[in-house]
Amino acid sequence: MKRKNIIIVLWILWIVSMIGMVFGVYYYINNKRSRLRSEIRENIFKIFEGQSSGGMFVSNDNGFFDVEYSDSLVCYYKKVVIPSKPAK
């Protein structure tokens, strides 16, 4: 083959590979986004498993509730002994 033909073939292969990479990266990002979204949902459901904001069902020793102080009554809480001050 002539040098000119080799250069043209290489340019065509380079352009095709760039187009293929654009579509491949786009496909990879969309798949990863979907996978991470479902993983986040599963982990959030695991964190709050067995808890409710109403008054019907709460498990895991009345659950774990992380709330800000709002000067209102809290339905479910666990009474624990306040730990002593640690020694220096």
Image (tube, rainbow, N blue to C red):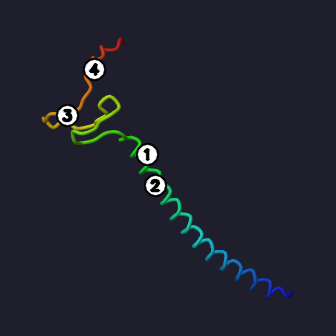
Image height check: is 67 above or below 12?
A: above
> Which tag, 3 or 1, sits closer to the chain's start?
1
> Which tag, 1 or 4, sits closer to the chain's start?
1
Is label 2 in contact with label 4 (beta carbons under 8 Å)?
no
Q: Measure the C-alpha gap from mark 1 to mark 4.
A: 27 Å
Residue at x 63% of width, y 74% of height = 20
How crowded pointer 1 is (Cα within 10 Å; few <14, some 14-19, many 20+) is rated as few
- Which amino acid type corresponds to the residue marked 4 in the rendered image? Val
Give the residue number, with chain letter if any, for mark 1.
Answer: 43
Position of the C terminus, as image quadrant, is: top left
Give the residue number, with chain letter if any, for mark 3.
Answer: 75
The answer to whether 1 appears left or right of 57 in the picture is right
Q: Quadrant of residue 49?
A: top left
> Which tag, 2 or 4, sits closer to the chain's start?
2
Residue at x 48% of width, y 60% of height = 34
> Which tag, 2 or 1, sits closer to the chain's start?
2
Observer-nearest residue: 11 or 30? 30
The answer to whether 34 appears left or right of 81 in the picture is right
> Which tag, 4 or 3, sits closer to the chain's start?
3
Q: Measure the C-alpha gap from mark 3 to mark 1.
A: 25 Å
> Which tag, 2 or 3, sits closer to the chain's start?
2
Q: Measure the C-alpha gap from mark 4 to mark 3.
A: 16 Å
Identify the disc placed on residue 80.
4
- Which amino acid type corresponds to the residue marked 3 in the rendered image? Cys
Q: Which secondary structure, mark 1?
A: helix
Image position, residue 22 (x, y; %): 58, 72
- Which amino acid type corresponds to the residue marked 2 in the rendered image? Ser
Identify the disc placed on residue 67.
none
The answer to whether 72 appears left or right of 13 in the picture is left
Give the residue number, with chain letter if any, for mark 2.
Answer: 38
